Amino acid sequence: MSRGGPVPVPRGDRAQRISIPRYSRFVLLVGEDQSLFRVVNTFVHIGNALTTVCIRPHESGSCYSSKISAVHRPGANKGRYVFQMDPHVASSSLHGGVQLGRFFLLVPPDLVDESTNELTIKIHIEKIKCAVHH
């Protein structure tokens, strides 16, 4: 993971693998269309809660879905993982703070790599057709 700036989100059906410091509050991702996403990391006593928010000047524009999975740490039970899909990523202008989406992934502490104090996730963000609201 690049620590100096946003991490690029690959195009197509590939997921991006990134490591997040356990106590880091967020990671920025940039899409191929220059959309900016914030993976919000909230540390709680039962693990890390992760959610994805699209950052833009106003609420309208393109719509996205995201899939996040936590990857087992080295030496752990390789069958252990957690997965979350957000069918509609929330948008935020950051005015008044980030409004979190309805979906989040709770990563249990045993999936954190104790040698680096990081959790590794795979994330896939894709553009979807926006729902029409009446």
Image: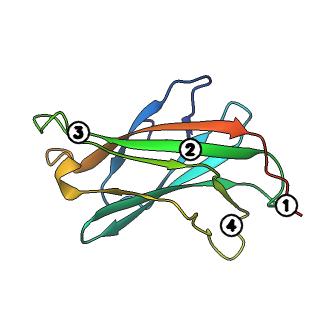
Could you tell me how far apart the alpha carbons at marks 3 and 2 are, in whole angstroms? 20 Å
Q: Residue at x 30, y 56 (%)?
A: 22
User: Disc 2 residue type?
Assistant: Ser
Mark 3 Cα shell of 10 Å, populated few (<14), some (14-19), many (≥20): many
- Give the residue number, with chain letter if any, for mark 3: 72
Circle 4 Cα neighbour tier, 10 Å, few/some/many (<14 / 14–19 / ≥20): few
Q: Distance from label 2 to label 4 (Cα)?
A: 19 Å
Q: Residue shown at 20%/57% (left/top)? A: 109
Q: Amino acid at mark 3?
A: His
Location of residue 100 with respect to 105 vertically, above or below:
below
**Residue at image mark 2:** 66
Write down the quadrant of residue 34 in the picture. top right
Give the labeled residue for mark 1.
133
Q: Label 4 amino acid?
A: Leu
* Vertical position of residue 64 compared to residue 24: above or below: above
Q: Quadrant of the N terminus?
A: top left
